[in-house]
Amino acid sequence: MVASHEVVLEIAKPEHATLLFHLLELYLHDLSDIFPIDIGPDGRFGYDRLPLYFEEPERRFPFLIRANGHPAGFALVTRGSPVTEDPADLDIAEFFVARRYRRSRVGRTAAFQLWDRMPGHWIVRVSEGNRRGLPFWRKIISEYTDGAFSVDARAGTPHPWCVLTFRTPQGGFTRAGP
């Protein structure tokens, strides 16, 4: 049975930087299973680009995901994607849901809220080595778009990338329920 959570996607403010940094450490720990990410000499993975999300508000968009009022994850979005030439494309640079909230529709609900909030042409890049993430993204994008999305493969290291693209209508899709 899937637990029911009240999910809120909120714009992260500079005062949330420490919280995001801590969540990024959990995210990078998970990714170290897929990518050759080393722990730094200070015992942390680190995420050097985090300050840019507060310095470039017209191009980078940090979001916190809360479930029942508790921090449950984040989404980092950029305008412009490394896989397209259109500077208006929206790209999910990083997306994370803490293990406690996985398989309970928190990620799905947060992603739907994100796409409804920021209509446009979306790019979701997922390493083919991410065996848990890839089925998640394929499923929820298919559900969100009623199957109206495209999939492309790109070379990558250490694994190829699956690039999913779709367009949200102005104002997002209308649906009943999370």
Image: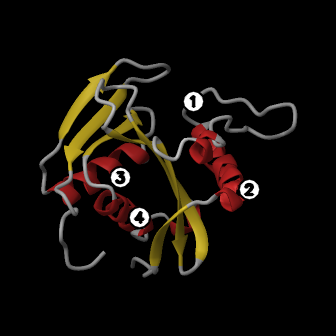
Q: Secondary structure at mark 1?
A: loop
User: Is residue 91 left or right of 10 when viewed as pictured?
Assistant: left
Q: Mark 2 or mark 4, which has the lower sequence index?
A: 2
Residue 175 visible in the shown view: yes
Q: Residue at x 46, y 80 (%)?
A: 5
Q: Mark 3 or mark 1, which has the lower sequence index?
A: 1
Q: Mark 1 or mark 4, which has the lower sequence index?
A: 1
Q: Give me the disc on residue 110.
A: 4
Q: Which residue is mark 1?
A: 35
Of circles 3 and 4, the one toward us is 4
Are circles 2 and 3 on residues that touch, CB within 8 Å?
Answer: no
Residue 96 visible in the shown view: no
Of circles 1 and 4, the one toward us is 4
Q: Residue at x 24, y 39 (%)?
A: 165
Q: Residue at x 36, y 43 (%)?
A: 134
Q: Which residue is mark 3?
A: 136
Q: CA distance from mark 1 to mark 4?
A: 25 Å
Q: Secondary structure at mark 4?
A: helix
Q: Mark 2 or mark 3, which has the lower sequence index?
A: 2
Are circles 2 and 4 on residues that touch, CB within 8 Å?
Answer: no
Residue 55 x %, y %? 61, 42
Q: Which residue is mark 2?
A: 18
Question: Which of the two residues, 64 or 146, is positioned nearer the viewer here?
Answer: 64
Q: Secondary structure at mark 3?
A: helix
Kind of residue at disc 2? Thr
